[in-house]
Image (tube, helix red, strand yellow):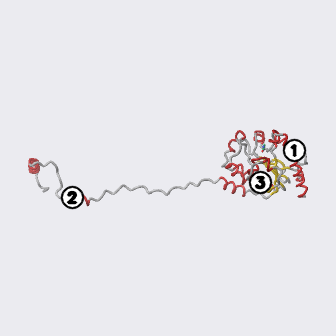
Amino acid sequence: MDSELDWHSARAALEWQMDLGVTETILDMPVNRFEVVAEPKPAQAPVAAPVVVQEADPVAEAQAAASAAPTLEALAQALEAYPHCELQKGARTTVFADGTPNARVMIVGEAPGRDEDRQGKPFVGRAGQLLDRMFHAIGLSRTSPDAQAALYITNVLPWRPPQNRDPRPDEIAMLMPFLRRHIQLADPDVLVIMGNISCQALLGRRGITRLRGQWTDAVGKPALPMFHPAYLLRQAHAKREAWADLLSLQARLRDLG
Ligand code: URA
């Protein structure tokens, strides 16, 4: 339209169009809607690459921590610092070991109970007192400084399970690298494996009634499964077999020289 058009003429032209029935205003030229370029979409934030969260592998971490420990003290520290075992949170102390580390005989029990958790030492409750009497009968003691007559004592689990429940397989699996390293570093002549949980952990087998008294190998050491002293407190008749096993241990030590 002529931009010079004056106001009155423009109004008259518009009214004339309205008189003719025009209801819509349209453009001078048709628009080809098929050619209309779509409005560009607002730029989207670049999609970040998915973050892969590496799940911790408790057994592999235990293996790495344990095998890096050059001494028993370092192993005890590595165990304290190990973050993946829930049992540690419920325990008062870490029960690492008792006795003489260079002893010829290393006893592996199951787990600390209430007394052990309080004192931070394995086998100090009633079962522990029976254990001391049993080994004393063949001339072995945890207080002897002489490696020939000494005992070194630990457990599969260094932390007391709540209500003394049995440890779960995943708990045993993550603590086994520490126990294996413990045995390597202490380097005893023989192992005594006390009870079913310890047989499960070190031999992969349960059934202490059949296993006891049968020499086998564990972690590269001659190993003798025995009834747990807590079982002997409940089943006095089994003391006869326990005595036979102690004599077998004594004979083996003599043979080994
Ligand atoms: N029973 C175990 O097996 N270990 C202990 O230390 C005490 C009781």
Q: Residues within 10 Å of mark 1 (few under 14, many from 20)?
A: few
Read off the residue under disc 1. Answer: 240
Q: Nearer the viewer, residue 1 or 56?
A: 56
Q: At numbered mark 1, what does the secondary structure look like: helix, strand or loop?
A: helix
Q: Residues within 10 Å of mark 3 (few under 14, many from 20)?
A: many
Residue type indicated by callout 2: Val
The residue at the point 68 percent across, 49 percent down is 169
The residue at the point 87 percent across, 50 percent down is 150
The N terminus - image quarter: bottom left
Q: CA distance from mark 2 to mark 1?
A: 107 Å
Left or right relative to 49: residue 150? right
The C terminus - image quarter: bottom right
Mark 1 vs mark 3: in front: 1
Residue type indicated by callout 3: His
Question: Which mark is first along the chain, 1 or 2?
Answer: 2
Q: Position of residue 225 (x, y in %)?
A: 81, 50
Q: CA distance from mark 2 to mark 3?
A: 86 Å
The residue at the point 69 percent across, 41 percent down is 90
Read off the residue under disc 2. Answer: 31
Residue type indicated by callout 1: Arg
Q: Is mark 3 within 8 Å of ligand 1?
A: no
> For residue 182, which numbered disc appears in the image?
3
Q: At numbered mark 2, what does the secondary structure look like: helix, strand or loop?
A: loop
Left or right relative to 94: residue 251? right
